[in-house]
Amino acid sequence: MVNYYDRSWNISHFKLHKSWYNVNETYQREQVWNQREKQYLLDSIIKAFPIPQIFVRKISGDKYEIVDGQQRLTSIWEFIDNKFPLHAEYSGSTLGGKRYKDLPSDVQVAFDSYPINTIVLEDYDDENIRSLFKRLQSGKAPYSWGEIERISWQNYVINA
């Protein structure tokens, strides 16, 4: 029988224990988010907006396999590793252009404390994981950046 439970781990957990998490490349795609998509996610975290939950399969002890959330976790890890800065368009002139190491200490603490809701899957065999992964991915038709911008502008027109 398969089993799962909810956890809320903050970013500092994922920062300290990055080696605990692996990607199964037999069904996971490579990193596909561009830098602006990553910056948009990070700005959501800095603004304390909710982000989608992560799904991981417990392999053994402290070893987990990322089932859903690879793009999000990789973006967070790359930002913490100072691989790219925040974008001024999303994060404003004060934080735009800053890498993780350059953030004011209060912003770093808030970022590290941000909770990521995580579903931990136990006793899932490969067949169940693939089935769940397909279900999580089905019906997703991603918005293009043009559609996102149109939605953003409609908000201004409606509230004008």
Image: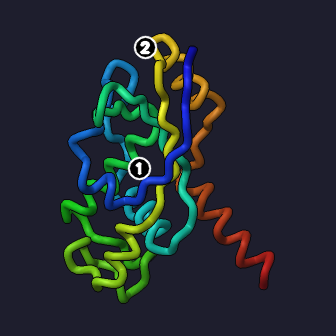
Q: Position of residue 139 (x, y in %)?
A: 65, 31
The quadrant the C terminus occupies is bottom right
At x 65% / y 63%, what residue is drawn? Answer: 150
Residue at 28% from the left image edge and 83% from the top image edge: 105
Side of 34 where 138 appears, left or right: right
From the viewer's perspective, is residue 8 above or below residue 93?
A: above
Q: Is residue 24 above or below residue 128?
A: below
Q: CA distance from mark 2 to mark 1?
A: 22 Å
Whichever of labels 2 and 1 marks the residue nearer the N terminus, that label is 1
**In the current view of this chain or complex, which residue is farthest to the front?**
61
**Residue 107 placed where, x, y %?**
36, 80
Q: Which mark is residue 82?
A: none
**Which residue is at the front of the view, 95 or 47?**
47
Quadrant of the image containing the N terminus: top right
The residue at 57%/61% (across/down) is 50
Alpha-carbon neighbours of circle 1 within 10 Å: few (<14), some, or many (≥20)? many
Task: Give the number of the mark in front: 2 or 1.
Answer: 2
Q: Is residue 61 above or below residue 53?
A: above
Q: From the viewer's side, name the closer residue of 130 and 145.
A: 130
Crowding at label 2, few (<14), some or many (≥20) Cα neighbours within 10 Å?
A: few
Q: Amino acid at mark 2?
A: Asp
Q: Residue furthest top?
A: 127
Q: Which label number is shown at residue 126?
A: 2
What amino acid does circle 1 point to?
Answer: Arg
User: Where in the figure is residue 88, as x and y percent of width and height?
Assistant: 38, 79
In the rendered image, residue 134, in percent from the top left (x then y), is placed at 55, 22
- Label 1: element kind: helix
Q: Are marks 2 and 1 in contact (CB under 8 Å)?
A: no
Which label number is shown at residue 72? 1
